[in-house]
Amino acid sequence: MELFLNGNWIKIVLNKMKNKLNILNEFSEYPKLRYCTLSETSAEKFYHELLNERFGNAVIEKTDLEVNIDYTAGYTSSFLDEAFGNLVFDFGLETVNKHLVIISNDEPYWLDMIKSETFKEWQKRRKENNAPKKTKSHLPWYRFVDNTLGKKIWIEHV
Amino acid sequence: MCEINWEILVNFIGIIVNGFLAWWIVNSIQKRMKDERTIKDHFILEIKDLRGDCRGLLTSIFSGKRTPDEMIFSLKLIGIKSTHLLDIFDTNFKISKNYLNQYLVEINQIITDDSNFIANANTNNKITLSDQTQRAILRFQAQHQMVFNNLILLVNDCSYVSMNK
């Protein structure tokens, strides 16, 4: 894409721009617990309303998704585990590592937990097809299966 | 006529130069050691403050004076303080910035996975954690009671590397 600005042609390479998701600005200052039935600002809600859709689009566009988890009032470990764990369950660890960038300057120990514990455990769940619990019905969401990205309701809520 | 004794003069200059060098070396080393000690003492106090914050949080949690939101916020403040302190330690003392990672994640897990915490997360009432969680916190404190003391020992034993160099 090219723009004519101040007498100059400026080339914008769109496919190199990073998609960004800021939890404070786009979701909540108070992200809380794992499931929709436990809290209004749950990881399940965050995943299905924002993270899955944005990440799926980033995979389709062959770009990265940058998720900034700074500046909220804090996290429970279960929120981060459920949100980023579901991503690994639906897309696989290789795709997540390739397209996801998490920014946490305030609390970098969460990155350590997500990468060393959450990703490994949820990749194991993906291989064993140990599906995550859904406590509410959700709109169709992306999942990477047999090298194909599909979008449907993969799990009915309990 | 006075004749210059070059040997005496050279020796005299040598003594003065050596004396100046000795004074300069002792003075600069002493200053460096004093500066390093002052910096280490400051950071040791910061570690003690951090340990005090952690103990204060756990004490207030045990006495049922905190709401779930307050607990998460306090954990976050402790996390930010640890991060900034360990960033400096990593740069200036070559101590791993991940030193407290496990401690910070584990204490968050124990508190926020508690059944009373989960039940009151929406209403945000002041809560007392379940007996099971309180026992888990006591076990956690026992297992990690040396973590801050060991960090103090590390800071004390490491050489300070100035960022200005």
Image: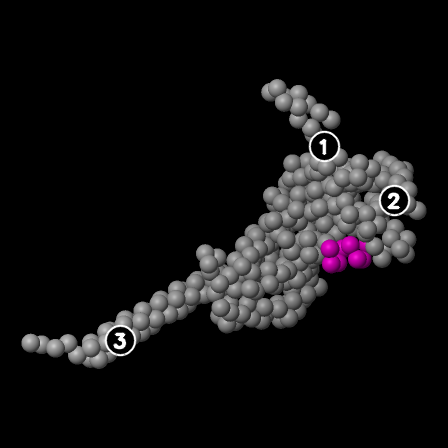
Q: How is the image coloured?
A: one colour
Mark 1 or mark 2: which is in front?
A: 1
Could you say which quadrant of the image residue A13 lies in? top right
Pointer 2: what residue?
A: A144
> Both on one chain, marks 1 and 3?
no
In this rendering, the answer to whether A6 lies above or below A46 is above
Residue A78: image location, x then y, percent: 73, 52
Q: Nearer the viewer, residue B135 or A103?
A: A103
Instruction: Label 2: state its secondary structure.
Output: strand
* Residue occupying image coordinates x 87% and y 44%: A144
> Both on one chain, marks 1 and 2?
yes
Query: Residue most toward the left?
Result: B1
Mark 1 or mark 3: which is in front?
A: 3
> Which chain letter goes with mark 1?
A
Q: CA distance from mark 1 to mark 2?
A: 27 Å
Q: Amino acid at mark 1?
A: Val
Instruction: Label 3: state its secondary structure.
Output: helix
Query: Residue most toward the right?
Result: A146
Residue B90, which numbered label? none
Mark 1 vs mark 2: which is more N-terminal? 1
* Residue occupying image coordinates x 43% and y 63%: B39
